[in-house]
Image: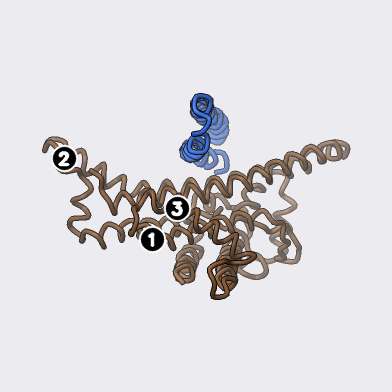
Amino acid sequence: MTALLLALLLQAAPAAAAAAPAEGPAARAEATAPLPGQTAADHDDRREREEEGLGQVIMHHVTDQPVFGLPSKHLLYFVISALLVIAGTRSAVRSYRGGLVPHGIGAAVESLVLFVRDEIALPNIGQDDGRRFTPLLCSFFFFILVAALLGLVPLPGYQAGHWFFASTTATGNLAVTMGLALVSFAAQQYAGISKYGLIRHFRNLVPSGLPVLLLPIMIPVEIISMFTKPFALMIRLFANMLAGHMVVTTLILLISLMAQIHWLGGVVMAPVSIVLSVFILLLEVLVAFIQAYIFTLLSAIFIGMYAHPAH
Amino acid sequence: MDPKTLAFFAAGIGAGLTIMGGAAGIGRLAAAAMEGIARQPNAAGDIRGAMIVAAGLIEGVTFFALVVTAILAFK
């Protein structure tokens, strides 16, 4: 249920942010990407000019594009990932059938949920607070994992008269990771304020028994660190997902680049590029798991820091 | 030299320096983890978990610099 609310909440954040695609630095660089209002002819002109802007071509493929008439590729995959998470967990809950032993997909989901609760939530947040925040951490973990794995499946997209390879990681958009980081930030503040009240939560930032001379240094440092933690989460997830896709796109584009010099160059380059791309995609699977785990773990650590200030 | 050339040049050097710092940090981390596992093989699971977390954090910092380099190269 919390996963459903969280998914709805998360849909609101990037939907509002995708309307202003100048959120992220990568989006600002898409000067030559087709905007939703442009026609097929403009897009074909741009494709003819591909040779003169290798950087623009790469950015064209890894940043947000219109697909199927919808304004945003990342938003479409975001919604598909959220629906997959909701459907998967609902069928997992249904597989319990009133007993205590789940079957099929329920067993896999149960083992992951137990992993999140026993390894990530309880050691970092504490016993009863950990159980309160486990649904949120499970939502983070499953959503990031499903979004990253979905971005590796090659699915076709159709826009402006031509089919193209449209498969992207929803978390490879700065707006989506900003939404996730904002939810994490809100959870951290909620953890502190619901336990200690508004004033004491901020007074907990600086340890007691500190020499007064250090206060002018400690207070700005603590306040800034309160904001840099979600910012670091955002950038880390975004850059990991984006870097994987950028490397694969570059490797595939090398085939076309070599083929423009001489057609034999393309033939020779193709097996090399494809093998390297397969390895990079395998690495991406591992990176997907690791990044989901690190986002969830760091969120749990930060929530624990505000719920139990150990100073 | 016009600014665009300098920007590409700086992006290249920046990417190299970034990867030098990141690889040196993760290399030291991996060496310490190997040593720890060699000394106490039954702590291998904990050490491996801590190593992955630390590697993720160091790579996060590396990616900050990489994002700056990418902005330089593509803008």
CA separation in Å, label 1 and label 3:
10 Å
Name the side, left or right, on which A264 lies relative to A13: right
Which numbered disc covers residue A239?
A: none
Can residue B1 be spotted in the picture?
no
* Residue identifier under label 2: A215
Residue type marked 1: Arg
> Do discs 2 and 1 belong to a common subunit?
yes
Q: Count neighbours of disc 2 (C-alpha within 10 A) and say few if under 14, some if 14 to 19, many if 20 or more.
A: few
From the image, tell me which residue sits under label 3. Answer: A118
Marker count (numbered)? 3
Marks 1 and 3: same chain? yes
Q: Mark 2 or mark 1: which comes first in sequence?
A: 1
A41 or A11, nearer to the observer: A11
Quadrant location of the C terminus of chain A in the rendered image = top left
- Badge 3 amino acid: Asp
Q: Residues within 10 Å of mark 1 (few under 14, many from 20)?
A: some
- A234 over A73 or under it: above or below: above
Q: What residue do we see at 46% from left, 52% from top?
A: A296
Q: Secondary structure at mark 3?
A: helix
Query: Does A241 appear above or below B49?
Result: below
Place of residue A1 in the rendered image (x, y in percent of width and height, measured from the top left): 46, 72
Rendered colour, chain A: brown
Chain letter for mark 1, please.
Answer: A
Residue at screen point 48% across, 67% down: A3
Q: CA distance from mark 2 to mark 1?
A: 35 Å
Farthest-out residue, bottom: A98
Query: Which chain comes out blue in the rendered image?
Result: B
Comparing A275 with A62, the one in front is A275
Q: Is residue A255 visible?
A: yes
Q: Give the numbered dot on residue A131.
A: 1
